[in-house]
Image (cartoon, coloured by chain):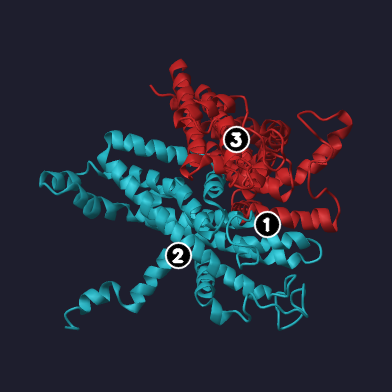
Protein backbone atom coordinates (compact mmCIF):
# COMPACT_ATOMS: atom_id res chain seq x y z
CA UNK A 1 0.00 0.00 0.00
CA UNK A 2 2.65 2.42 1.07
CA UNK A 3 4.96 1.41 -1.75
CA UNK A 4 2.11 1.67 -4.24
CA UNK A 5 1.68 5.31 -3.55
CA UNK A 6 5.34 6.02 -3.06
CA UNK A 7 5.89 7.49 -6.52
CA UNK A 8 2.82 9.67 -6.32
CA UNK A 9 3.70 10.80 -2.85
CA UNK A 10 7.25 11.56 -3.79
CA UNK A 11 5.95 13.70 -6.59
CA UNK A 12 4.32 16.45 -4.64
CA UNK A 13 3.58 15.35 -1.11
CA UNK A 14 7.06 14.93 0.36
CA UNK A 15 8.14 17.62 2.77
CA UNK A 16 10.92 18.74 0.46
CA UNK A 17 8.73 19.45 -2.54
CA UNK A 18 6.00 20.88 -0.35
CA UNK A 19 8.55 23.26 1.02
CA UNK A 20 9.59 24.20 -2.49
CA UNK A 21 5.99 24.78 -3.44
CA UNK A 22 5.51 27.07 -0.50
CA UNK A 23 8.66 28.92 -1.40
CA UNK A 24 7.50 29.34 -4.97
CA UNK A 25 4.15 30.64 -3.81
CA UNK A 26 5.94 33.46 -2.00
CA UNK A 27 3.36 33.52 0.76
CA UNK A 28 2.92 36.88 2.47
CA UNK A 29 4.21 35.70 5.84
CA UNK A 30 3.89 38.91 7.82
CA UNK A 31 0.22 39.56 6.94
CA UNK A 32 -0.58 35.89 7.52
CA UNK A 33 1.09 35.96 10.92
CA UNK A 34 -0.81 39.12 11.89
CA UNK A 35 -4.13 37.62 10.80
CA UNK A 36 -3.36 34.38 12.65
CA UNK A 37 -2.61 36.26 15.87
CA UNK A 38 -5.78 38.35 15.58
CA UNK A 39 -7.86 35.28 14.80
CA UNK A 40 -6.34 33.46 17.78
CA UNK A 41 -7.11 36.40 20.06
CA UNK A 42 -10.65 36.59 18.72
CA UNK A 43 -11.40 32.91 19.31
CA UNK A 44 -9.61 32.55 22.63
CA UNK A 45 -10.30 36.06 23.93
CA UNK A 46 -11.34 34.73 27.34
CA UNK A 47 -8.04 32.84 27.71
CA UNK A 48 -5.70 35.45 26.24
CA UNK A 49 -6.92 38.65 27.82
CA UNK A 50 -5.53 39.52 31.25
CA UNK A 51 -8.81 40.96 32.56
CA UNK A 52 -12.51 40.83 31.89
CA UNK A 53 -13.20 43.65 29.39
CA UNK A 54 -16.01 44.96 31.63
CA UNK A 55 -14.04 44.79 34.88
CA UNK A 56 -13.61 48.25 36.41
CA UNK A 57 -10.44 49.03 38.32
CA UNK A 58 -11.77 52.12 40.08
CA UNK A 59 -8.41 53.06 41.58
CA UNK A 60 -6.70 53.20 38.20
CA UNK A 61 -8.93 55.25 35.92
CA UNK A 62 -7.37 56.76 32.78
CA UNK A 63 -4.01 55.15 33.51
CA UNK A 64 -1.50 55.80 30.68
CA UNK A 65 0.00 52.79 28.89
CA UNK A 66 3.33 51.12 29.73
CA UNK A 67 3.16 52.28 33.35
CA UNK A 68 2.18 49.11 35.13
CA UNK A 69 2.27 45.41 34.38
CA UNK A 70 -1.34 45.23 35.50
CA UNK A 71 -2.61 47.39 32.61
CA UNK A 72 0.05 47.36 29.91
CA UNK A 73 -1.94 49.46 27.46
CA UNK A 74 -3.52 51.62 30.16
CA UNK A 75 -7.13 51.95 31.24
CA UNK A 76 -10.16 53.96 30.14
CA UNK A 77 -12.27 56.41 32.10
CA UNK A 78 -13.95 53.64 34.10
CA UNK A 79 -10.69 51.84 34.78
CA UNK A 80 -11.37 49.07 32.26
CA UNK A 81 -8.22 47.40 30.97
CA UNK A 82 -7.50 48.58 27.39
CA UNK A 83 -5.59 45.47 26.33
CA UNK A 84 -8.49 43.24 27.37
CA UNK A 85 -10.99 45.44 25.60
CA UNK A 86 -8.88 45.38 22.44
CA UNK A 87 -8.62 41.59 22.54
CA UNK A 88 -12.38 41.24 22.99
CA UNK A 89 -12.75 43.83 20.23
CA UNK A 90 -11.12 41.34 17.85
CA UNK A 91 -13.80 38.83 18.82
CA UNK A 92 -16.55 41.40 18.25
CA UNK A 93 -15.14 42.22 14.84
CA UNK A 94 -15.12 38.54 13.91
CA UNK A 95 -18.66 38.03 15.24
CA UNK A 96 -20.05 40.94 13.24
CA UNK A 97 -18.13 40.77 9.99
CA UNK A 98 -17.89 36.99 9.48
CA UNK A 99 -21.65 36.20 9.42
CA UNK A 100 -22.50 39.27 7.34
CA UNK A 101 -19.76 38.39 4.86
CA UNK A 102 -21.05 34.81 4.63
CA UNK A 103 -24.58 36.02 3.92
CA UNK A 104 -23.30 38.57 1.40
CA UNK A 105 -21.19 35.96 -0.38
CA UNK A 106 -24.01 33.39 -0.50
CA UNK A 107 -26.57 35.90 -1.75
CA UNK A 108 -24.17 37.45 -4.23
CA UNK A 109 -23.09 34.09 -5.59
CA UNK A 110 -26.64 32.85 -6.05
CA UNK A 111 -27.73 36.07 -7.75
CA UNK A 112 -24.61 36.07 -9.94
CA UNK A 113 -24.99 32.43 -10.98
CA UNK A 114 -28.71 32.70 -11.69
CA UNK A 115 -28.35 36.02 -13.46
CA UNK A 116 -25.44 34.91 -15.60
CA UNK A 117 -26.86 31.53 -16.52
CA UNK A 118 -30.48 32.41 -17.15
CA UNK A 119 -29.82 35.63 -19.08
CA UNK A 120 -32.73 37.51 -20.68
CA UNK A 121 -35.09 39.45 -18.42
CA UNK A 122 -34.04 37.71 -15.21
CA UNK A 123 -30.53 38.93 -15.87
CA UNK A 124 -31.70 42.46 -16.71
CA UNK A 125 -33.83 42.78 -13.59
CA UNK A 126 -31.22 41.34 -11.23
CA UNK A 127 -28.40 43.42 -12.68
CA UNK A 128 -30.43 46.63 -12.51
CA UNK A 129 -30.95 46.02 -8.80
CA UNK A 130 -27.28 45.12 -8.38
CA UNK A 131 -26.17 48.29 -10.13
CA UNK A 132 -28.50 50.40 -8.03
CA UNK A 133 -26.98 49.00 -4.82
CA UNK A 134 -23.44 49.33 -6.19
CA UNK A 135 -24.16 52.86 -7.36
CA UNK A 136 -24.63 54.23 -3.88
CA UNK A 137 -21.97 54.61 -1.23
CA UNK A 138 -22.20 51.72 1.26
CA UNK A 139 -22.43 54.05 4.22
CA UNK A 140 -25.54 55.75 2.82
CA UNK A 141 -27.33 52.46 2.16
CA UNK A 142 -26.31 51.22 5.60
CA UNK A 143 -27.62 54.40 7.24
CA UNK A 144 -30.93 54.06 5.39
CA UNK A 145 -31.30 50.48 6.60
CA UNK A 146 -30.38 51.29 10.18
CA UNK A 147 -32.84 54.20 10.17
CA UNK A 148 -35.80 51.99 9.53
CA UNK A 149 -34.70 48.87 11.38
CA UNK A 150 -33.21 50.70 14.33
CA UNK A 151 -29.68 50.59 15.72
CA UNK A 152 -28.13 47.37 16.98
CA UNK A 153 -25.64 44.67 16.05
CA UNK A 154 -28.10 42.60 14.05
CA UNK A 155 -29.19 45.54 11.96
CA UNK A 156 -25.61 46.56 11.32
CA UNK A 157 -24.95 43.01 10.13
CA UNK A 158 -27.98 43.21 7.83
CA UNK A 159 -26.76 46.57 6.55
CA UNK A 160 -23.28 45.20 5.80
CA UNK A 161 -24.66 42.15 4.00
CA UNK A 162 -27.13 44.31 2.07
CA UNK A 163 -24.39 46.55 0.73
CA UNK A 164 -21.77 43.89 -0.01
CA UNK A 165 -23.64 41.17 -1.91
CA UNK A 166 -23.87 43.28 -5.06
CA UNK A 167 -20.14 43.25 -5.77
CA UNK A 168 -20.12 39.46 -5.61
CA UNK A 169 -23.18 39.21 -7.84
CA UNK A 170 -21.61 41.45 -10.51
CA UNK A 171 -18.30 39.65 -10.52
CA UNK A 172 -19.74 36.11 -10.50
CA UNK A 173 -22.19 36.99 -13.27
CA UNK A 174 -19.29 38.21 -15.41
CA UNK A 175 -17.43 34.95 -14.84
CA UNK A 176 -20.50 32.88 -15.67
CA UNK A 177 -21.08 34.80 -18.90
CA UNK A 178 -17.51 33.98 -19.89
CA UNK A 179 -17.88 30.22 -19.39
CA UNK A 180 -21.52 29.42 -20.02
CA UNK A 181 -21.03 28.94 -23.76
CA UNK A 182 -17.97 26.73 -23.36
CA UNK A 183 -18.15 23.17 -24.65
CA UNK A 184 -18.51 21.40 -21.31
CA UNK A 185 -21.56 23.45 -20.42
CA UNK A 186 -23.16 23.09 -23.84
CA UNK A 187 -22.51 19.32 -23.80
CA UNK A 188 -24.11 19.03 -20.37
CA UNK A 189 -27.15 20.87 -21.74
CA UNK A 190 -27.31 18.52 -24.73
CA UNK A 191 -27.16 15.53 -22.40
CA UNK A 192 -30.21 16.96 -20.67
CA UNK A 193 -28.60 17.83 -17.36
CA UNK A 194 -30.94 20.04 -15.35
CA UNK A 195 -30.17 23.75 -15.07
CA UNK A 196 -29.69 23.50 -11.32
CA UNK A 197 -27.18 20.71 -11.77
CA UNK A 198 -25.28 22.61 -14.46
CA UNK A 199 -25.01 25.66 -12.27
CA UNK A 200 -23.94 23.64 -9.24
CA UNK A 201 -21.60 21.08 -10.84
CA UNK A 202 -20.21 22.95 -13.84
CA UNK A 203 -20.42 26.67 -13.28
CA UNK A 204 -19.95 27.05 -9.54
CA UNK A 205 -16.61 25.19 -9.34
CA UNK A 206 -15.29 27.53 -12.01
CA UNK A 207 -16.06 30.69 -10.10
CA UNK A 208 -14.59 29.57 -6.77
CA UNK A 209 -11.24 31.20 -7.48
CA UNK A 210 -12.86 34.51 -8.27
CA UNK A 211 -14.98 34.16 -5.18
CA UNK A 212 -11.98 33.58 -2.93
CA UNK A 213 -10.07 36.51 -4.40
CA UNK A 214 -13.01 38.88 -4.17
CA UNK A 215 -13.69 37.78 -0.60
CA UNK A 216 -10.17 38.44 0.56
CA UNK A 217 -10.08 41.78 -1.24
CA UNK A 218 -13.44 42.83 0.26
CA UNK A 219 -12.80 41.85 3.87
CA UNK A 220 -10.76 44.98 4.51
CA UNK A 221 -13.55 47.20 3.20
CA UNK A 222 -16.12 45.36 5.31
CA UNK A 223 -14.03 45.78 8.47
CA UNK A 224 -13.73 49.50 7.76
CA UNK A 225 -17.49 49.78 7.17
CA UNK A 226 -18.26 47.90 10.39
CA UNK A 227 -15.81 50.06 12.34
CA UNK A 228 -17.33 53.23 10.89
CA UNK A 229 -20.85 52.14 11.78
CA UNK A 230 -19.81 51.27 15.35
CA UNK A 231 -17.96 54.56 15.58
CA UNK A 232 -21.11 56.42 14.53
CA UNK A 233 -22.95 54.65 17.35
CA UNK A 234 -25.23 52.58 15.14
CA UNK A 235 -24.12 49.11 16.20
CA UNK A 236 -23.22 47.90 19.65
CA UNK A 237 -23.96 49.97 22.73
CA UNK A 238 -21.32 52.34 24.11
CA UNK A 239 -19.10 50.47 26.54
CA UNK A 240 -19.13 47.24 24.53
CA UNK A 241 -15.73 46.06 23.33
CA UNK A 242 -15.63 47.03 19.64
CA UNK A 243 -12.71 48.86 18.06
CA UNK A 244 -14.88 51.51 16.44
CA UNK A 245 -16.61 52.23 19.75
CA UNK A 246 -13.28 52.46 21.55
CA UNK A 247 -12.12 55.13 19.11
CA UNK A 248 -15.40 56.98 19.65
CA UNK A 249 -14.88 56.84 23.42
CA UNK A 250 -11.33 58.05 23.03
CA UNK A 251 -12.66 61.03 21.14
CA UNK A 252 -14.03 62.41 24.40
CA UNK A 253 -10.58 62.37 25.98
CA UNK A 254 -8.53 63.66 23.09
CA UNK A 255 -5.73 65.35 24.95
CA UNK A 256 -6.06 63.71 28.39
CA UNK A 257 -6.03 60.10 27.23
CA UNK A 258 -4.70 59.79 23.67
CA UNK A 259 -4.15 56.04 24.07
CA UNK A 260 -7.84 55.15 24.12
CA UNK A 261 -8.29 56.22 20.50
CA UNK A 262 -4.77 55.42 19.29
CA UNK A 263 -4.53 51.65 19.86
CA UNK A 264 -7.83 50.46 18.38
CA UNK A 265 -7.19 52.61 15.29
CA UNK A 266 -3.76 51.07 14.82
CA UNK A 267 -5.29 47.62 15.13
CA UNK A 268 -7.98 48.34 12.52
CA UNK A 269 -5.38 49.77 10.14
CA UNK A 270 -3.01 46.84 10.60
CA UNK A 271 -5.74 44.22 10.14
CA UNK A 272 -7.14 45.92 7.03
CA UNK A 273 -3.61 46.26 5.61
CA UNK A 274 -2.93 42.59 6.31
CA UNK A 275 -6.12 41.57 4.52
CA UNK A 276 -5.36 43.87 1.58
CA UNK A 277 -1.86 42.42 1.21
CA UNK A 278 -3.18 38.90 1.49
CA UNK A 279 -5.92 39.66 -1.02
CA UNK A 280 -3.43 41.09 -3.51
CA UNK A 281 -1.24 38.05 -3.09
CA UNK A 282 -4.13 35.62 -3.53
CA UNK A 283 -5.28 37.43 -6.65
CA UNK A 284 -1.85 37.22 -8.23
CA UNK A 285 -1.39 33.64 -7.14
CA UNK A 286 -4.74 32.24 -8.26
CA UNK A 287 -5.40 34.28 -11.33
CA UNK A 288 -2.92 36.68 -12.90
CA UNK A 289 -5.66 37.83 -15.28
CA UNK A 290 -7.40 39.55 -12.39
CA UNK A 291 -4.41 41.68 -11.54
CA UNK A 292 -5.91 44.80 -13.03
CA UNK A 293 -9.52 44.25 -12.01
CA UNK A 294 -9.12 45.05 -8.33
CA UNK B 1 -23.91 61.53 -28.69
CA UNK B 2 -27.43 62.87 -28.26
CA UNK B 3 -28.71 59.32 -27.94
CA UNK B 4 -26.03 58.59 -25.38
CA UNK B 5 -26.91 61.65 -23.30
CA UNK B 6 -30.62 60.91 -23.54
CA UNK B 7 -30.06 57.33 -22.44
CA UNK B 8 -27.88 58.36 -19.51
CA UNK B 9 -30.42 61.01 -18.49
CA UNK B 10 -33.20 58.45 -18.55
CA UNK B 11 -31.11 56.02 -16.50
CA UNK B 12 -30.33 58.72 -13.96
CA UNK B 13 -34.00 59.63 -13.74
CA UNK B 14 -35.03 56.00 -13.21
CA UNK B 15 -32.45 55.57 -10.45
CA UNK B 16 -33.69 58.72 -8.78
CA UNK B 17 -37.31 57.52 -8.89
CA UNK B 18 -36.19 54.14 -7.55
CA UNK B 19 -34.38 55.88 -4.69
CA UNK B 20 -37.40 57.97 -3.82
CA UNK B 21 -39.55 54.84 -3.92
CA UNK B 22 -37.20 53.00 -1.57
CA UNK B 23 -37.00 55.95 0.82
CA UNK B 24 -40.74 56.48 0.79
CA UNK B 25 -41.60 52.79 0.71
CA UNK B 26 -39.42 51.83 3.64
CA UNK B 27 -41.44 54.06 5.92
CA UNK B 28 -44.52 52.10 4.91
CA UNK B 29 -42.76 48.75 5.19
CA UNK B 30 -42.10 49.37 8.85
CA UNK B 31 -45.81 49.33 9.60
CA UNK B 32 -47.73 52.43 10.51
CA UNK B 33 -46.10 55.39 8.73
CA UNK B 34 -48.02 57.78 10.93
CA UNK B 35 -46.04 56.50 13.90
CA UNK B 36 -42.83 57.48 12.12
CA UNK B 37 -43.86 60.68 10.46
CA UNK B 38 -45.96 62.30 13.15
CA UNK B 39 -44.38 63.68 16.25
CA UNK B 40 -46.90 62.21 18.69
CA UNK B 41 -45.85 61.55 22.23
CA UNK B 42 -48.83 59.43 23.31
CA UNK B 43 -50.84 57.27 20.96
CA UNK B 44 -53.76 57.20 23.37
CA UNK B 45 -55.37 60.37 22.11
CA UNK B 46 -56.99 58.73 19.09
CA UNK B 47 -58.78 61.88 17.97
CA UNK B 48 -55.58 63.93 17.73
CA UNK B 49 -53.84 61.01 16.07
CA UNK B 50 -56.54 60.66 13.40
CA UNK B 51 -56.69 64.40 12.85
CA UNK B 52 -52.95 64.62 12.34
CA UNK B 53 -53.00 61.59 10.08
CA UNK B 54 -55.60 63.31 7.95
CA UNK B 55 -53.73 66.62 7.97
CA UNK B 56 -50.61 64.91 6.64
CA UNK B 57 -52.61 62.92 4.07
CA UNK B 58 -51.61 59.61 5.60
CA UNK B 59 -55.16 58.24 5.28
CA UNK B 60 -54.98 58.34 1.47
CA UNK B 61 -53.99 55.37 -0.74
CA UNK B 62 -50.29 54.51 -1.02
CA UNK B 63 -49.87 55.68 -4.60
CA UNK B 64 -51.46 59.07 -3.94
CA UNK B 65 -49.22 59.51 -0.91
CA UNK B 66 -46.21 58.58 -3.01
CA UNK B 67 -47.12 61.11 -5.71
CA UNK B 68 -47.59 63.67 -2.99
CA UNK B 69 -44.19 62.82 -1.53
CA UNK B 70 -42.54 63.22 -4.94
CA UNK B 71 -44.28 66.51 -5.61
CA UNK B 72 -43.08 67.88 -2.31
CA UNK B 73 -39.61 66.33 -2.51
CA UNK B 74 -38.93 68.23 -5.74
CA UNK B 75 -39.44 71.42 -3.74
CA UNK B 76 -37.27 70.05 -0.91
CA UNK B 77 -40.39 70.00 1.25
CA UNK B 78 -40.01 67.08 3.66
CA UNK B 79 -42.07 68.47 6.52
CA UNK B 80 -40.80 69.64 9.87
CA UNK B 81 -37.80 68.23 11.66
CA UNK B 82 -38.95 66.73 14.98
CA UNK B 83 -35.95 67.86 16.96
CA UNK B 84 -35.29 71.28 15.43
CA UNK B 85 -39.04 72.01 15.11
CA UNK B 86 -38.62 73.84 11.84
CA UNK B 87 -38.85 72.86 8.15
CA UNK B 88 -36.29 70.31 6.93
CA UNK B 89 -36.00 72.50 3.83
CA UNK B 90 -34.52 75.35 5.87
CA UNK B 91 -31.99 73.05 7.50
CA UNK B 92 -31.06 71.54 4.13
CA UNK B 93 -30.45 74.94 2.56
CA UNK B 94 -28.12 75.80 5.45
CA UNK B 95 -26.28 72.50 5.31
CA UNK B 96 -25.82 71.92 1.58
CA UNK B 97 -23.19 74.69 1.06
CA UNK B 98 -21.04 73.26 3.88
CA UNK B 99 -21.03 69.79 2.36
CA UNK B 100 -20.31 71.08 -1.14
CA UNK B 101 -17.41 73.22 0.13
CA UNK B 102 -15.96 70.22 1.93
CA UNK B 103 -16.36 67.82 -1.00
CA UNK B 104 -14.86 70.24 -3.52
CA UNK B 105 -11.91 71.03 -1.24
CA UNK B 106 -11.39 67.32 -0.69
CA UNK B 107 -11.34 66.64 -4.42
CA UNK B 108 -8.97 69.51 -5.19
CA UNK B 109 -6.65 68.42 -2.38
CA UNK B 110 -6.73 64.80 -3.56
CA UNK B 111 -5.75 65.79 -7.11
CA UNK B 112 -3.16 68.35 -6.03
CA UNK B 113 -1.44 65.84 -3.74
CA UNK B 114 -2.17 62.58 -5.56
CA UNK B 115 -1.24 63.45 -9.13
CA UNK B 116 2.29 64.80 -8.55
CA UNK B 117 3.06 61.98 -6.10
CA UNK B 118 1.87 59.40 -8.65
CA UNK B 119 3.94 60.94 -11.44
CA UNK B 120 7.06 61.20 -9.28
CA UNK B 121 6.49 57.64 -8.14
CA UNK B 122 6.38 56.45 -11.76
CA UNK B 123 9.38 58.47 -12.93
CA UNK B 124 11.52 57.49 -9.94
CA UNK B 125 10.32 53.92 -10.17
CA UNK B 126 11.71 51.47 -7.57
CA UNK B 127 13.56 54.15 -5.65
CA UNK B 128 13.03 54.98 -1.98
CA UNK B 129 10.73 57.81 -3.05
CA UNK B 130 8.52 55.35 -4.93
CA UNK B 131 8.40 53.09 -1.89
CA UNK B 132 7.47 55.92 0.44
CA UNK B 133 4.66 56.95 -1.91
CA UNK B 134 3.42 53.35 -2.16
CA UNK B 135 3.48 52.91 1.61
CA UNK B 136 1.51 56.11 1.99
CA UNK B 137 -1.07 54.81 -0.51
CA UNK B 138 -1.38 51.48 1.31
CA UNK B 139 -1.83 53.29 4.61
CA UNK B 140 -4.38 55.69 3.14
CA UNK B 141 -6.52 52.83 1.94
CA UNK B 142 -6.40 50.87 5.19
CA UNK B 143 -6.63 53.51 7.92
CA UNK B 144 -10.17 54.30 9.04
CA UNK B 145 -11.08 57.92 8.27
CA UNK B 146 -12.53 58.61 11.70
CA UNK B 147 -9.34 57.47 13.40
CA UNK B 148 -6.98 59.45 11.18
CA UNK B 149 -9.20 62.46 11.82
CA UNK B 150 -8.99 62.04 15.58
CA UNK B 151 -5.22 61.54 15.52
CA UNK B 152 -4.77 64.70 13.42
CA UNK B 153 -7.02 66.60 15.82
CA UNK B 154 -5.00 65.40 18.81
CA UNK B 155 -1.69 66.39 17.27
CA UNK B 156 -2.42 69.43 15.08
CA UNK B 157 -5.32 70.96 16.97
CA UNK B 158 -4.62 69.70 20.48
CA UNK B 159 -0.90 69.59 21.19
CA UNK B 160 0.40 71.95 18.49
CA UNK B 161 -2.69 74.17 18.42
CA UNK B 162 -2.15 74.98 14.73
CA UNK B 163 -5.61 74.39 13.33
CA UNK B 164 -9.17 74.47 14.67
CA UNK B 165 -10.42 71.06 15.82
CA UNK B 166 -13.99 71.30 14.65
CA UNK B 167 -16.71 73.33 12.99
CA UNK B 168 -16.82 75.65 10.06
CA UNK B 169 -15.90 78.83 11.87
CA UNK B 170 -17.91 81.91 11.06
CA UNK B 171 -18.53 80.87 7.48
CA UNK B 172 -22.16 80.49 6.50
CA UNK B 173 -23.85 79.85 3.20
CA UNK B 174 -22.14 79.60 -0.16
CA UNK B 175 -19.82 82.59 -0.28
CA UNK B 176 -18.00 83.97 2.75
CA UNK B 177 -16.94 87.58 3.10
CA UNK B 178 -13.40 88.37 2.01
CA UNK B 179 -12.23 88.84 5.57
CA UNK B 180 -13.52 85.40 6.52
CA UNK B 181 -11.61 83.47 3.88
CA UNK B 182 -8.44 82.75 5.92
CA UNK B 183 -10.60 81.46 8.77
CA UNK B 184 -12.65 79.37 6.35
CA UNK B 185 -9.53 77.76 4.88
CA UNK B 186 -8.09 77.03 8.32
CA UNK B 187 -11.27 75.19 9.22
CA UNK B 188 -11.33 73.32 5.92
CA UNK B 189 -7.78 71.93 5.92
CA UNK B 190 -8.14 69.00 8.32
CA UNK B 191 -11.56 67.68 7.23
CA UNK B 192 -10.71 68.10 3.55
CA UNK B 193 -7.43 66.24 3.98
CA UNK B 194 -9.06 63.34 5.83
CA UNK B 195 -11.78 63.17 3.21
CA UNK B 196 -9.16 63.20 0.46
CA UNK B 197 -6.88 60.58 2.03
CA UNK B 198 -8.50 57.44 0.63
CA UNK B 199 -8.82 59.00 -2.83
CA UNK B 200 -5.26 60.32 -2.77
CA UNK B 201 -4.15 56.70 -2.55
CA UNK B 202 -6.33 55.66 -5.47
CA UNK B 203 -5.37 58.68 -7.61
CA UNK B 204 -1.70 58.05 -6.91
CA UNK B 205 -1.91 54.43 -8.00
CA UNK B 206 -3.85 55.42 -11.10
CA UNK B 207 -1.48 58.25 -12.03
CA UNK B 208 1.48 55.97 -11.45
CA UNK B 209 0.28 53.13 -13.67
CA UNK B 210 -0.99 55.52 -16.38
CA UNK B 211 2.34 57.33 -16.32
CA UNK B 212 4.33 54.10 -16.52
CA UNK B 213 2.31 53.08 -19.56
CA UNK B 214 2.85 56.41 -21.30
CA UNK B 215 6.56 56.50 -20.44
CA UNK B 216 6.87 53.18 -22.23
CA UNK B 217 5.24 54.48 -25.41
CA UNK B 218 7.02 55.20 -28.67
CA UNK B 219 6.43 58.93 -28.78
CA UNK B 220 7.94 59.47 -25.34
CA UNK B 221 10.93 57.32 -26.26
CA UNK B 222 11.25 59.27 -29.49
CA UNK B 223 11.22 62.56 -27.62
CA UNK B 224 13.93 61.25 -25.33
CA UNK B 225 16.01 60.00 -28.25
CA UNK B 226 15.59 63.38 -29.89
CA UNK B 227 17.48 64.72 -26.91
CA UNK B 228 14.75 66.69 -25.19
CA UNK B 229 15.25 67.38 -21.52
CA UNK B 230 13.69 64.98 -19.04
CA UNK B 231 11.60 67.72 -17.54
CA UNK B 232 9.93 68.62 -20.82
CA UNK B 233 9.36 64.99 -21.77
CA UNK B 234 7.87 64.03 -18.43
CA UNK B 235 5.66 67.00 -17.73
CA UNK B 236 4.73 68.10 -21.26
CA UNK B 237 4.62 64.91 -23.30
CA UNK B 238 3.92 62.13 -20.87
CA UNK B 239 1.97 63.66 -17.98
CA UNK B 240 -0.60 65.38 -20.17
CA UNK B 241 -1.70 62.13 -21.73
CA UNK B 242 -1.47 60.12 -18.56
CA UNK B 243 -3.71 62.54 -16.72
CA UNK B 244 -6.92 62.07 -18.72
CA UNK B 245 -8.08 58.93 -16.86
CA UNK B 246 -6.88 60.39 -13.57
CA UNK B 247 -8.93 63.56 -13.89
CA UNK B 248 -11.97 61.52 -14.87
CA UNK B 249 -11.52 59.42 -11.77
CA UNK B 250 -11.25 62.59 -9.72
CA UNK B 251 -14.61 63.67 -11.09
CA UNK B 252 -16.24 60.36 -10.35
CA UNK B 253 -14.87 60.37 -6.83
CA UNK B 254 -16.45 63.78 -6.24
CA UNK B 255 -19.77 61.96 -6.33
CA UNK B 256 -18.50 59.65 -3.61
CA UNK B 257 -17.02 62.52 -1.64
CA UNK B 258 -20.36 64.28 -1.45
CA UNK B 259 -21.61 61.30 0.52
CA UNK B 260 -18.49 59.76 1.98
CA UNK B 261 -18.36 62.78 4.17
CA UNK B 262 -20.80 61.44 6.79
CA UNK B 263 -18.00 60.13 9.02
CA UNK B 264 -15.75 63.14 8.43
CA UNK B 265 -18.56 65.60 9.11
CA UNK B 266 -19.37 63.80 12.35
CA UNK B 267 -15.79 63.80 13.64
CA UNK B 268 -15.19 67.45 12.78
CA UNK B 269 -18.71 68.56 13.74
CA UNK B 270 -18.91 69.98 10.22
CA UNK B 271 -22.42 71.38 9.79
CA UNK B 272 -23.20 69.56 6.53
CA UNK B 273 -25.83 67.20 5.16
CA UNK B 274 -23.96 64.12 6.41
CA UNK B 275 -24.03 65.29 10.01
CA UNK B 276 -27.69 66.20 9.59
CA UNK B 277 -28.36 62.68 8.31
CA UNK B 278 -26.69 61.00 11.28
CA UNK B 279 -28.40 63.29 13.77
CA UNK B 280 -31.68 62.33 12.13
CA UNK B 281 -30.89 58.60 12.24
CA UNK B 282 -29.90 58.64 15.91
CA UNK B 283 -32.99 60.59 17.00
CA UNK B 284 -35.54 58.78 14.78
CA UNK B 285 -36.15 62.08 13.07
CA UNK B 286 -37.62 60.66 9.89
CA UNK B 287 -38.42 63.83 7.93
CA UNK B 288 -34.83 64.93 8.43
CA UNK B 289 -33.46 61.54 7.33
CA UNK B 290 -35.69 61.50 4.25
CA UNK B 291 -34.58 64.99 3.29
CA UNK B 292 -30.88 64.31 3.81
CA UNK B 293 -30.93 60.97 1.98
CA UNK B 294 -32.93 62.28 -0.97
CA UNK B 295 -30.61 65.27 -1.38
CA UNK B 296 -27.41 63.18 -0.99
CA UNK B 297 -28.74 60.54 -3.37
CA UNK B 298 -29.83 63.08 -5.96
CA UNK B 299 -26.47 64.85 -5.73
CA UNK B 300 -24.72 61.53 -6.20
CA UNK B 301 -26.77 60.56 -9.24
CA UNK B 302 -26.42 64.00 -10.79
CA UNK B 303 -22.65 64.17 -10.34
CA UNK B 304 -22.17 60.69 -11.74
CA UNK B 305 -24.37 61.68 -14.68
CA UNK B 306 -22.41 64.84 -15.46
CA UNK B 307 -19.08 63.00 -15.21
CA UNK B 308 -20.35 60.24 -17.50
CA UNK B 309 -21.52 62.71 -20.11
CA UNK B 310 -18.25 64.64 -19.96
CA UNK B 311 -16.39 61.37 -20.25
CA UNK B 312 -18.49 60.54 -23.29
CA UNK B 313 -17.27 63.75 -24.92
CA UNK B 314 -13.65 63.10 -23.98
CA UNK B 315 -13.54 59.44 -24.93
CA UNK B 316 -15.80 58.33 -27.80
CA UNK B 317 -15.16 54.68 -26.98
CA UNK B 318 -17.52 54.68 -23.98
CA UNK B 319 -20.45 55.79 -26.15
CA UNK B 320 -22.62 52.93 -27.34
CA UNK B 321 -22.46 52.46 -31.14
Residue A69 in view = yes
Residue B163 x, y percent position in the rendering: 83, 48
Q: Is residue B197 visible?
A: no
The 10 Å Cα crowd at callout 1, few under 14, some 14 to 19, many 20 or more, is many
Chain A colour as displayed:
cyan
Residue A26 has which mark? 2
Label 3: which secondary element: helix
Same chain shared by disc 1 and disc 2: no
Q: Contact, CB < 8 Å: mark 2 with mark 3?
A: no
> Within the image, what quadrant is residue B255 found in?
top right
N-terminal of the two: label 1 or label 3? 3
Above or below: residue A104 compared with residue A258: above
Query: For this rendering, which residue is in front, B284 or B148?
Result: B284
Q: Residue at x 41, y 65 (%)?
A: A24
Cα–Cα gap, marks 1 and 2: 32 Å
Q: Is residue B95 left or right of residue A161?
A: right
Chain B rendering hue: red
> Which x, y percent locates residue A209?
35, 55
| Quadrant assignment for the N terminus of chain A | bottom left
Percent across and percent down for residue A179 are 26, 44
The residue marked by circle 2 belongs to what chain? A
- Distance from Cα at disc 2 to Cα at disc 3: 68 Å
| Residue placed furthest toward the left | A191
- Name the chain under label 3: B
Q: Nearer the viewer, residue A94 or B112?
A: A94
Give the residue number, with chain letter if any, for mark 3: B52
Amino acid sequence: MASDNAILVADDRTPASLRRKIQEARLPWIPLAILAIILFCAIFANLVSPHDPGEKDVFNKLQPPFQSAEHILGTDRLGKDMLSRLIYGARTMLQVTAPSMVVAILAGTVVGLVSGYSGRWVDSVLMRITDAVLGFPSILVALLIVTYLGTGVWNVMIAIAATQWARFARMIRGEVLAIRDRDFVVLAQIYGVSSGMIVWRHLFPNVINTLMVLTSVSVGQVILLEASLSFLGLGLRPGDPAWGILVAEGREFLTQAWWIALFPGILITVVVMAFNFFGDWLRDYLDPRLRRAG
Amino acid sequence: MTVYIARRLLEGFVTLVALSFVVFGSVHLTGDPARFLLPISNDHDEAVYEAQKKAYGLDKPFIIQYANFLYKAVQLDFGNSFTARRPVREILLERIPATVHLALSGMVLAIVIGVPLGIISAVKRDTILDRVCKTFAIFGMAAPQFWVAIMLIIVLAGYLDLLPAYGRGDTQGWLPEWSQIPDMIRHLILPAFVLALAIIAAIMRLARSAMLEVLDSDYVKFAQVKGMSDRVVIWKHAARNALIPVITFGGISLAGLLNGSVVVEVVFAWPGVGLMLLEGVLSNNFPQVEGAIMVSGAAYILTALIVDIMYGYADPRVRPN
